[in-house]
Amino acid sequence: MDNGLSIEAIGSEIFKEHEREAAELFVRFEEKFTDEKKWIDLVPEILSRQYQLCIVRDAGKAIAVALTFVKDDARKTCVISHCAGHGYEQWVDQLLVTIRVWSHSLGSTKLEIVARPGWERILRPLGMVKTHVIMELKSNG
């Protein structure tokens, strides 16, 4: 990539070499989303290839991570389920392109992201459109 960034898909066979740096970035996600799965719960799913880990690097230093999976639906929808890091302005567009190319190679024809409301203004200029609204009600039980 010509701006000094690189995006690497981390396969399960080399995951252990990259686990620590990915975990350090993922902590940021865990701090914001306490209801979501913890890193320790996702590791077995990454190792079993249910999730694909991508690491964004700037001059070799990991600055962001993303987890994706492909749904077993008619369009083989690729879902970006988790993303954490800093300086999104410099990498979000390249990350989306990289994930789209990878998922297309698997036969996927749709990319889906579930994100906080503020991401809509960031993702809209990149071609993403809001198709649903997710509403939650916490149970007291």
Image: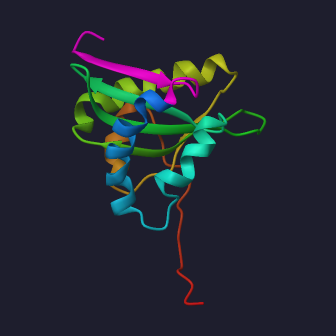
* Residue 90 falls within the magenta-colored stretch: no
The colour scheme used here is: rainbow
Extreme residue toward the front, this view? 16
Find residue 4 and report its horizontal and vertical position in percent.
22, 15
Give the x, y percent position of residue 71. 70, 40
Residue 133, placed above or below residue 19:
below
Is 37 in front, or is 97?
A: 37
Image: magenta residue range:
1-15
Give 14 or 134, whichever is nearer the viewer.
Answer: 14
Residue drawn 27% across the image and 37% down it: 88
In the image, residue 89 lies at what x, y percent?
24, 34
Left or right of 93, for residue 130: right
Is 13 magenta? The answer is yes
Question: In the picture, which quadrant includes the C terminus?
Answer: bottom right
- Residue at position x 48%, y 23% from top? 9
On the image, which quarter does residue 87 sit in? Answer: top left
Q: Looking at the picture, how far across and down is residue 67, in whole percent? A: 50, 39
* Residue 99 visible here: yes
Q: Quadrant of residue 85?
A: top left
Residue 17 horizontal side relative to residue 52, left or right:
left
**Residue, x 53% and y 18% (percent of image)?**
101
The one nearer the camera, 93 or 120, is 93
Determine whether 96 is above or below 84 in the image: above
State the residue at coordinates (49%, 67%).
Answer: 35
- Compared across the picture, whether 122 is left or right of 75 comes to left
Toward the top, the furthest residue is 2
Q: Residue furthest bottom?
A: 141
Q: Is residue 138 above or below residue 91?
A: below
- Whether residue 78 appears in this view of the structure is no
Q: Is residue 92 left or right of residue 69?
A: left
Q: How many marks?
A: 0
Q: Quadrant of the N terminus?
A: top left
